[in-house]
Image (cartoon, rainbow, N blue to C red):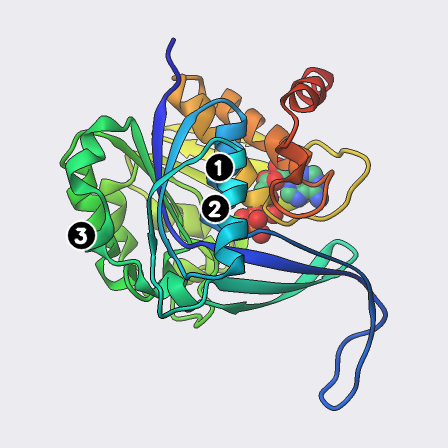
Amino acid sequence: MSAKKILVIGELNVDILLNHILGFPEVGKEILASNMSTVLGSSSAIFASNLASLGAKVSFCGTIGQDAYADIVLASLRKSQVATQFIHTVSEENTGATIILNYNQDRANITYCGAMDSLTSDLIPWQKISEFDHIHISNFFIQKGIRDDIIEIFKRIKGYGVTTSLDMQWDVEEKWDFDYKRGLQFIDIFLPNEAEILKLTKSKTLQQAIGKIQPYDGYLVIKQGIKGSRGIHKNEEVVCPAYHLKPFVDAIGAGDSFNAGFILKFLEEASLEECLDMGNKIGAISTTATGGTKAFENKKSIEKRLSQLH
Ligand SMILES: Nc1ncnc2c1ncn2[C@@H]1O[C@H](COP(=O)(O)OP(=O)(O)OP(=O)(O)O)[C@@H](O)[C@H]1O
Ligand SMILES: [Mg+2]
């Protein structure tokens, strides 16, 4: 079977990771971090990079500035074989950056959006959409140029007969302004985490949230961190436990890596359980190296890790 073609539409930024910080920073004071790295960041790009590393043919549509961070973004995507011809350079803007303060299994982030705000619907390669099998969009609340048009964008994409997925991610403004009752009819796979679906649906329990999403013909996939994941499709509900791998380094990009594993299996027409299980495996592998993509740099080591997970 030939590799499936996926277009990812989304935000691009670097992650500046500060590790081993002694205490929490306070205004007017200074603390030290004993380790720093600057790597490919952004939910959409981590997803694209890891999906390509797993063997899919992935193209990216997004916006960067004209600076050293743009070079890091492009070089990282190209290294993992992501096609970059639909990435636009906005010379008057800086490439986005997220500064991540890592504390054990959790982290504090600050994002500067910069050029990512310049991605608008008219930069999507509409004349090429039908050449792809699947379109994925992530993190739209943060992207000012597409967030108000997100449902129209999905509706138009569906008109080309391809499958679609959305990981909406956290809404930094906490408005959760997404009309899911209308929007989800154009989305085949909806991939929130537990906290996000509770906020979106204004629910107290997961069962209440799932009930509010129904009726939904697509795949509702809920990521639950160290607990694993849960999938609901038509009358089927499957709960899949996480894999715990050593060493645990950080959980940056675990959700995007999960998405890559799930969608890879979905495009192979695997069962819901197989899709969830592959999502959990790829999510767990991502936690074994620093940042969102490092654990997927070496194809042989991914295969070895996968063969060890049962
Ligand atoms: N500490 C962990 N150990 C093992 N597996 C993990 C861990 N954290 C996440 N995973 C796996 O990765 C999947 C996705 O992670 P998570 O639920 O944190 O998604 P998320 O909140 O969307 O993440 P992100 O912050 O990357 O957006 C989980 O369902 C689980 O399978
Ligand atoms: Mg997430």
Alpha-carbon distance for marks 3 and 2? 28 Å
Q: Position of residue 274 (x, y in %)?
A: 52, 20
* Residue wearing tag 3: 152
Figure quarter occupied by ligand 1: top right
- Say what secondary structure mark 1 lies in: helix
Q: Which residue is mark 2?
A: 74
- Taking depth in this image into account, of 12 and 165 the one nearest to the observer is 12
Q: Quadrant of the N terminus?
A: top left
Residue 227 visible here:
no
Q: Is residue 223 above or below residue 36?
A: above
Residue 19 shows in the view: yes
Q: Residue at 61% x, 40% y: name it.
A: 293
Q: How many marks?
A: 3
Residue density around tag 3, few if under 14, some if 14–19, many if 20 or more, within 10 Å:
some
User: For mark 1, what is the residue?
Assistant: 78
Position in image of residue 103 (x %, y %): 77, 61
Asked if disc 1 and disc 3 are in contact, CB closer than 8 Å, the reply is no
Crowd band around label 2 with a 10 angstrom C-alpha radius: few (<14), some (14–19), many (20+): some
Instruction: Choose between 272 and 13: the one closer to the eye.
Output: 13
Q: Label 1, label 3: how many angstroms apart (C-alpha)?
A: 30 Å
Tell me the kind of residue under disc 2. Answer: Leu
Marks 1 and 2 sit apart, C-alpha to C-alpha, by 6 Å
Q: Check if mark 1's residue and mark 2's residue have beta carbons within 8 Å.
A: yes
Disc 1 within 8 angstroms of ligand 1 (CB): no
Residue at 26% over, 55% down = 150
Horizontal side of residue 208 vs 123, given as left or right: right
- Does any atom of ligand 2 lie closer than 8 Å to the CB of label 3? no
